[in-house]
Image (cartoon, helix red, strand yellow):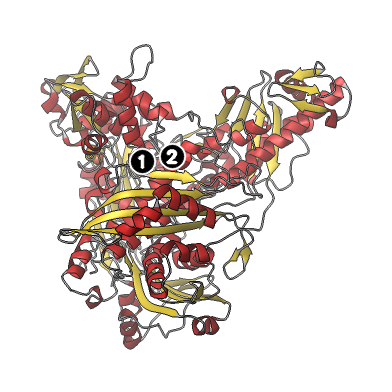
């Protein structure tokens, strides 16, 4: 289908501000009279605050005030996992206990030194299995796990059970969570190749480039909070609740966000933003809270580490007949995340496994706060499974590409325990396209070729994430001058989805993009509820809402024209600047005239009547405040049932040096299967960025903690091993299948997360290939693990562990 | 929480709001001045973006602090404040430097350029900025000013780098969004324009 805007590149309105430094992140704002907050954080991995004596600090010149957990939670802290604003019951080193405000940061720091904090040390755990074993320490007060609707509990296995699991056996303890479909026993019985192993994937921090600094002030009873998020309206109501102010008195300002990879999507993952707001309310001064890199490490979220056991069976033709998976998930210090469940769902979706069982037990450790991180679960498990797919292919005498094609998801397929259908799926096409672009036919022969200590390895990876939701709202206005204002609550964190989804509205109304404004950046610009911009869902979800709002406006424009100029609504069409009669195009009105007339008519035309009944409270407030201001299009997107997948495929060639354990990526081609492409440059950026993340997952990034004191050893960029220019290839080839999805009005689905999974899978497969098919069953596979393997030291001699070196 | 603990009674003497309100200008407040501005020995002149600016600088003050919190040049970002990420990169006598790790007093006699100084007076973007727009190099944009300054520094010393030379030249700038390839596209395009 020929589009005006969909599939075309454009310059999003914030890009010039990014290259000139003019765009503002929360720490770039200032107010007269502003004071500075510093955080006093927990020095112990698990403890209970007994006393805080701040009298000496508060008596210092220039110290303005203090905020403690008692101020925030006068009735006591919620007894549930999850980050608190401030806490007296820290469960990780660096967790904020109090904030102190002073005229400058140095004074605040000096004041911090004068605070006497008495804290009771409690036992701590760094590895879920250390806690799971009988008599092991519990990470939380009241247990090592949290049971929904029941509270904290203690989950224990016998030492024999834990030891057997560590050494590779199937766990025998009952799991907290499970699902199953198909006949597992029959699947294994029908399998010609069965592989069974334990595995581990590391947790590691998000490390968004912008620390979650925030500034807040109160004016005329309203709280203004400059902060960071993945979507403004998705977090606004929750943040208002945490601050303790009605939504209508809360203004969230967030023009740009310096990175959000899952941990800025919900208010519950950024409660720290409430510190300056509450402190400002208490001391009646604007408060800037600058968050340091180390603090960002602690409260910025981390990927869940998984320790697990899998058994997988393939039939003679290569079909994945059965998969049995048991995970122990690392829930970190504040609970949380569903990586294991997503991992299992991802296997079912990507490999169309005929029978499957999933079991999981989640255990807390006194390590970084866990939660969603780019492709949570799917991306870790694909890195583990890709080399096993190759092993199966080798054993069954199949080509590595062919075994993937055989198991690939296609139109009409379903996945998961509920057999949920895909909205559409073209994985075989993506594999074909990637193979052609990479020239798999030629390059496959280079597999395992050696040159001195160097050896070539080839890998194919696949990625998946459920990539689209519904139930959000759209809101657009046409001003009397004919300009279109597209109100969009999607955050500006670098995907440019706030702009590209808005173009669906311009598409419907056939308007030049130069005549459209995207209204965003602060909630007092009246924005509708939007996707939280997590789960790769913005493109699917918010093109639906913008498209729907524009359809609503189009109908109203035709109604106004028909009422004024005669004829039926069906007699009218548009051309981007006029509404006119198709039979006689000279009879019509300009968009400006229609908008002016709509304003005169009021009522449903200006958002004062006949609104969709199910509008979210955030949207309803925005519409109420804009009512009567312009011709308005309003839409509530009804729920849809099917699963819009984001799929990716990566082909990679590496050269691995067996003497150093290091490798160079010689060629990397990554292909998206995400429906119609909305914004090619934005998509290419997601594929390239995902590739860098995939390389980090498979080769570099992991949490490290000092086992004696629970101190984090990877709180900076240097130690957490974020990939740099030199860790990534000079060129990343990209491509896309570009076939429309029927359940999105412009045919689009999301891609941000699977863009990473395919690359991590391809890299682990390539490393394994270079080492004659050796299976590490882990991510990352680091240089030291490779060197140990080459030296004949088995990584199996090192027991399954989390938050520590392995291999 | 042990209900018997009485932390609150220890939190004494909260100073009445405004009692220490000395911050008539936020820039001085932001950087740990022990006293209000005016200590003569701390007044220095630095050349930033072609203008000589007189500013009160504490002995331990970093260039990033001076730029951001005293001169209002917030385009220079702080990602780590400890020399690991490159978000704070500025040019000091044409050399890309981490402003978080340079003491302001040490650049008194040098020329400092920040991302704000690249645009021409008529608003024309510098070729690197223009190329970064055309290639959509930034994602979240937080590392972008540092990437821009490293690219400008690189192209001044090597106007026609190979892609590999550009990769090496930019290697001091981390991008958590992983936009390296798009930045390299921008650098190569800027070399063509430039
Ligand atoms: S802020 Fe200076 S190098 Fe990171
Ligand atoms: S564009 Fe986000 S850190 Fe580089």
Of all residues shown, which one is farthest toward the right? A567
User: What is the secondary structure assignment of the residue under circle 1?
Assistant: loop
Quarter of the image containing the C terminus of chain A? bottom left
**Marks 1,2: beta carbons within 8 A:** yes
Instruction: Report if the beta carbon of the residue with label 2 is closer than 8 angstroms to ligand 2.
Output: yes
User: What is the secondary structure assignment of the residue under circle 2?
Assistant: loop
In the rendered image of this protein, does residue A359 appear above or below residue A684? below
* Whole-percent x, y for residue B25 in the image: 30, 24
**Among the 4 quarters of the image, the one containing residue A288:** top left
Compared across the picture, whether A431 is left or right of A443 comes to right
Q: Please tell me whether mark 1 or mark 2 is closer to you in this view.
A: 1
In the rendered image of this protein, does residue A68 appear above or below residue A247? below
**Chain holding disc 2:** A
Residue position marked by numbered label 2 in the rendering: A494
Compared across the picture, whether A618 is left or right of A10 comes to right
Residue position marked by numbered label 1 in the rendering: B179
* Whole-percent x, y for residue B153 in the image: 22, 27
* Whole-percent x, y for residue A693 in the image: 36, 51
Query: Which of the two residues, A701 or A686, is positioned nearer the viewer here?
Result: A686
């Amino acid at each position: 289908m020929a589009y005006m805007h969909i599939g075309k590149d454009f310059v999003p309105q914030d890009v010039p501000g990014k290259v000139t430094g003019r765009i503002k992140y929360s720490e770039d704002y200032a107010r007269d009279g502003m004071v500075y907050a510093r955080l006093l954080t927990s020095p112990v991995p698990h403890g209970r605050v007994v006393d805080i004596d701040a009298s000496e600090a508060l008596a210092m010149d220039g110290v303005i005030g203090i905020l403690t957990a008692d101020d925030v939670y006068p009735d006591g802290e919620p007894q549930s996992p999850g980050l608190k604003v401030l806490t007296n019951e820290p469960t990780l080193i660096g967790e904020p206990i109090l904030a102190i405000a002073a005229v400058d940061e140095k004074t605040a720091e000096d004041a911090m030194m004068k605070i006497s904090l008495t804290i009771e040390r409690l036992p701590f755990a760094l590895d879920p299995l250390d806690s799971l074993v009988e008599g092991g320490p519990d990470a939380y007060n009241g247990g090592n796990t949290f049971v929904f609707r029941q509270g904290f509990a203690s989950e224990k296995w016998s030492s024999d059970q834990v030891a057997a699991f560590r050494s590779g056996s199937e766990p025998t303890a009952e799991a907290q969570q499970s699902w199953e479909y198909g006949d597992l026993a029959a699947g294994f019985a029908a399998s010609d190749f069965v592989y069974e192993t334990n595995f581990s994937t590391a947790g590691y921090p998000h490390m968004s480039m912008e620390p979650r600094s925030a500034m807040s002030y109160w004016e005329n009873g309203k709280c203004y909070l400059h902060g960071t998020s993945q979507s403004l309206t998705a977090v606004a109501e929750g943040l208002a609740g945490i601050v303790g102010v009605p939504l209508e008195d809360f203004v969230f300002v967030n023009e740009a966000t310096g990175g959000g990879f899952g941990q800025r999507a919900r208010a519950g993952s950024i409660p720290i933003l409430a510190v300056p707001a509450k402190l400002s309310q208490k001391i009646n001064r604007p408060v800037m809270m600058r968050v340091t890199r180390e603090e960002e490490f602690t409260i910025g979220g981390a990927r869940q580490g998984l320790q697990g056991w899998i058994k997988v069976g393939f039939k003679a033709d290569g079909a994945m007949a059965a998969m049995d998976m048991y995970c122990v998930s690392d829930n970190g210090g504040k609970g949380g995340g569903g990586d294991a469940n997503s991992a299992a769902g991802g296997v079912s979706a990507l490999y169309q496994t005929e029978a499957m069982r999933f079991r999981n037990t989640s255990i807390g450790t006194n390590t970084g706060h866990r939660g969603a991180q780019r492709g949570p679960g799917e991306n870790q498990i694909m890195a583990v499974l890709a080399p096993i797919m190759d092993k199966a292919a080798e054993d069954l005498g199949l080509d590595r590409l062919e075994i993937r094609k055989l198991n690939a998801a296609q139109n009409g397929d379903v996945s998961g325990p509920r057999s949920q259908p895909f909205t559409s799926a073209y994985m075989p096409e993506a594999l074909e396209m990637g193979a052609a672009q990479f020239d798999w036919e030629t390059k496959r022969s280079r597999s395992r070729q050696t040159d001195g200590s160097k050896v070539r390895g080839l890998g194919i990876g696949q990625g998946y994430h459920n990539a689209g939701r519904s139930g959000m709202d759209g809101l657009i206005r046409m001003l009397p001058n004919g300009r279109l204002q597209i109100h969009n609550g999607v955050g500006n964190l670098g995907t440019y989805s706030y702009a590209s989804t808005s173009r669906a509205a311009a598409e419907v109304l056939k308007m030049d993009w130069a005549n459209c404004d995207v209204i965003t950046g602060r909630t007092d610009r009246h924005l509708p509820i939007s996707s939280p911009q997590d789960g790769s869902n913005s493109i699917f979800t918010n093109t639906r809402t913008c498209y729907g709002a524009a359809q609503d406006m189009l109908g109203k424009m035709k109604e106004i024209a028909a009422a004024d100029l005669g004829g039926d609504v069906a007699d009218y069409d548009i051309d981007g600047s006029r509404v006119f009669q198709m039979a006689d195009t000279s009879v019509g009105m300009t968009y400006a005239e229609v908008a002016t007339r709509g304003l005169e008519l009021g009522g449903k035309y200006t958002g004062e009547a006949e609104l969709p009944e199910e509008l979210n409270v955030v949207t309803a407030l925005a519409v109420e405040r804009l009512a009567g201001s312009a011709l308005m299009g309003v839409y509530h997107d009804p729920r849809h049932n099917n699963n819009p997948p984001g799929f990716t495929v990566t082909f990679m060639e590496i050269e691995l040096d067996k003497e150093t354990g290091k490798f160079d990526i010689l060629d990397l081609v990554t292909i998206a299967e995400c429906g119609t492409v909305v914004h090619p440059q934005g998509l290419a950026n997601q594929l390239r960025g995902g590739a860098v993340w995939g390389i980090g997952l498979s080769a570099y990034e992991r949490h490290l903690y000092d086992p004696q004191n629970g101190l984090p050893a990877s709180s900076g960029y240097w130690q957490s091993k974020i990939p740099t220019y030199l860790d990534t290839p000079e060129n990343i080839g990209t491509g896309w299948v570009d076939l429309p999805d029927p359940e999105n009005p412009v045919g689009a689905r999301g891609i941000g997360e699977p863009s990473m999974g395919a690359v991590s899978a391809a890299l682990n497969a390539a490393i394994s290939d270079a080492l004659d098919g050796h299976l590490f069953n882990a991510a990352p596979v680091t240089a030291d693990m490779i060197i140990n393997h080459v030296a004949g030291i088995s990584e199996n001699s090192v027991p399954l562990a989390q938050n520590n070196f392995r291999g | 929480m042990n209900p018997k603990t009485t932390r609150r009674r220890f939190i004494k003497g909260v100073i009445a709001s405004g009692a220490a309100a000395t911050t008539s200008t936020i820039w001085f407040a932001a950087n740990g001045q022990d006293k209000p501005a005016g200590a003569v020995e701390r007044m220095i002149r630095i050349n930033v973006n072609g203008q000589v600016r007189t500013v009160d600088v504490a002995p331990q003050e970093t260039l990033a602090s001076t730029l951001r919190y005293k001169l209002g040049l917030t385009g220079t970002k702080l990602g780590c404040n400890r020399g690991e990420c490159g978000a704070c990169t500025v040019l000091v006598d044409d050399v890309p430097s981490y402003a978080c790790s340079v003491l302001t007093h040490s650049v008194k006699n040098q020329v400092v350029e920040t991302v704000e100084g690249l645009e021409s007076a008529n608003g024309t973007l510098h070729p690197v900025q223009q190329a970064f727009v055309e290639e959509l190099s930034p994602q979240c944009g937080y590392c972008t000013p540092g990437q821009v300054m490293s690219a400008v520094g690189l192209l001044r010393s090597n106007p026609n780098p190979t892609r590999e030379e550009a990769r090496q030249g930019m290697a001091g700038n981390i991008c958590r969004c992983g936009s390296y390839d798009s930045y390299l596209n921008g650098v190569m395009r800027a070399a063509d324009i430039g």
